[in-house]
Amino acid sequence: MLDIRRFDIYRKVPKDLTQPTTVGALISIFCVLFISFMIFNDVLAYIFIDLRSEFFIDDPGREGKIDVQVNVSFPHMACEYLGVDIQDENGRHEVGFVDHTNKVPLGDGGCRFESRFEINKVPGNFHLSTHSAASQPENYDMKHIIHSIKFGDDVSHKNLKGSFDPLANRDSLQENGLSTHEYILKIVPSVHEDYSGNILNSYQYTFGHKSYITYHHSGKIIPAVWFKYELQPITLKQTEQRQSFYAFLTSICAVVGGTFTVAGIIDSTFFTISELVKKQQMGKLT
């Protein structure tokens, strides 16, 4: 009868034929600690998502359009006077945009202005002003608090690093209420793809700011808050990547197998040298 044990390539050596050494014990302890550390890092690499960034010249977002979200408070300007006007180099000139616009009255006659609209992917501006009001206020005060100015899909739930809303919480409460404020925005398309393949087309931007007194053709000072934008010719793509289970398992096997192999060679080398030294010393004694 065929004895299957003949095919065992992992032959066992009886314990009474093995010899423990201090060096072997130290190497074994170091191996266990090193393997534990490497496995812990491999588990973290497998669990957590890595974000890979790349730049290219293109804007893969929705063809020709960008969604904009505006949320600004005017503590001293009533809601009835406020509106948003939109202009661009394609010839668009829309005064008093009202769709998807919400005005929330605040105490002391102020207003929180919220609006969602689309802009074309060409240089242009949108501004918050009293230009579309049926009547003008007796006193102008365009001091404001910017809660949010966002472009494209909302990525706030992703906790991404980047300049997606740098104007958030900026205010002009310490400035002259008659000043016109101009924010110059440089917009960069930013694509985020998660590990499931879902894509969000958002936009990051930087800004510059200046304020000044300007006069209407009627001779009156009619302040406004302008947001002038220009798209940059590059796109940032961020892709979430997670290590595959196959790569994780391969890495674990490589760490364990490689560590024990190298440790075995080191231990064998030390043991051989120590045996040679012992034999040499015994030869001198005789």
Image (cartoon, rainbow, N blue to C red):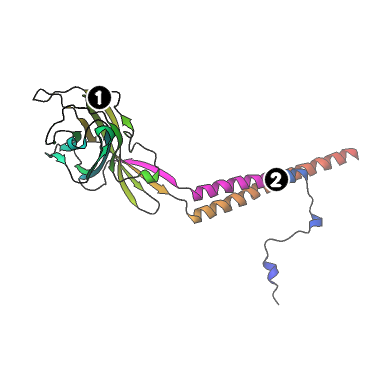
Q: Nearer the viewer, residue 224 or 60?
A: 224
Q: Nearer the viewer, residue 227 or 253?
A: 227
Q: Secondary structure at mark 1?
A: strand
Query: Which disc number belongs to residue 143?
Result: none
Q: Amino acid at mark 1?
A: Lys
Alpha carbon separation for disc pair 2 and 1:
65 Å
Region of the chain picked out in magenta, as a range: 28-56
Where residue 209 sits, quadrant-wise, is top left
Where 5 sits versus 205, above or below? below
Label 2 crowd bin: few (<14), some (14–19), many (20+), radius 10 Å: few
Q: Quadrant of the N terminus?
A: bottom right
Residue 45 shown in magenta: yes
User: Mark 1 or mark 2, which is nearer the start of the sequence?
Assistant: 2
The residue to which callout 1 is attached is 210
Where residue 168 sits, quadrant-wise, is top left
- Residue depicted at 78% across the width and 49% down the height: 20
Q: Amino acid at mark 2?
A: Ile
Q: Main secondary structure of the magenta part?
A: helix
Q: Locate residue 274, reporting x and y percent.
A: 78, 42
Q: Nearer the viewer, residue 20 or 105?
A: 105
Q: Secondary structure at mark 2?
A: helix
The residue to which callout 2 is attached is 29
Farthest-out residue, bottom: 1
- Residue depicted at 74% across the width and 46% down the height: 25
Q: Locate residue 115, reporting x and y percent.
A: 23, 42
- Residue depicted at 42% across the width and 49% down the height: 241
Q: Marks 2 and 1: which is nearer the front?
A: 1
Side of 194 where 264 appears, left or right: right
Where 22 sits versus 75, above or below? below
